[in-house]
Amino acid sequence: MKLRVAFILMLVFIGLVSMSRAQSWERLGSRAVNFGLDRDVINVGAHEGAFTKLKIQVTGAPVNMHRVKVEYMNGDVQNLQIKENFSPGSGTRIIDLKGNKRIIQRITFFYDTKNRAKRRAKVHVFGRH
C-alpha cells in the first residue's frame, strides 16, 4: 500500500513539473549584435526539447530586425518576417511556430543597427514548450 501511494505521489509531482515547464519561457540563447547590417545564429538543438512558441527581446541598444529564420531538426525551415525597430527593453509578440511541438536546430536573425552611442544591443530568444 505504501509503495502504491509513493508511486501515485511521484506521478503527481512529475505532472506538476511538466505543467509548470510547459507554461514557462526558456531562454534559448542570446547574442550581442554587431553594428551595421548583419546576421547572428543561435544554435539550439534537441537537448533543449520541443517548442510551440518563440519570443525575442532586445536589451542595451536599438535593433532594426528584418527577419528570423527558424530551422528545425527535420530540415524544415520557417521564415518569420519581423520587420520592426526594437528599442531597448522591447520585444516581439508571442510567435506561434508552425506544426506541433518542434525541435529547433538553429535560429538565425537578420538585423541592422545604427547606434550613435556605440552601445551594443543584445538579442535574447525564448521558447515555450
Image: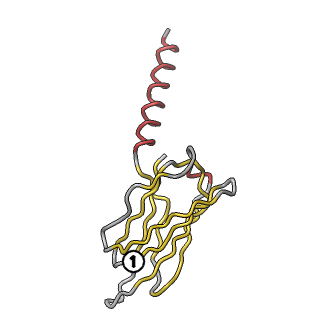
Report the amino acid beneath label 1: Val
Question: Considering the numbered disc 1 on the image, is that residue within a helix, a strand or a loop?
Answer: strand
| The furthest residue to the bottom | 116
Q: Quadrant of residue 12?
A: top left
Camera-nearest residue between 31 and 9 = 31
Mark 1 sits on what residue?
63
**Residue drawn at (50%, 48%), measured in percent from left and top?**
52
Q: Residue at coordinates 47% horizontally, 36% vertically from top-left? A: 18
Outermost residue toward the right?
75
Indicate whether 21 appears above or below 110.
above
> Where is residue 46 shown, x and y percent of the image?
62, 52
Q: Residue at x 46, y 49 (%)?
A: 128
Q: Nearer the viewer, residue 81 or 74?
A: 81
Identify whether 91 is placed above or below 72: below
In the image, what residue occupies the spot 35% across and 84% down? 119
Q: Is residue 112 above or below residue 102?
A: below
Image location (x, y in percent) of residue 123:
43, 70
Q: Residues within 10 Å of mark 1 (few under 14, many from 20)?
A: many
Outermost residue, top side = 1
Where, by quadrant of the figure, is residue 121 drawn? bottom left
Q: How is the image coloured?
A: secondary structure
Q: Position of residue 20 (x, y in %)?
A: 40, 39
Q: How many marks?
A: 1
Coordinates of residue 25 in the picture (x, y in percent): 41, 51
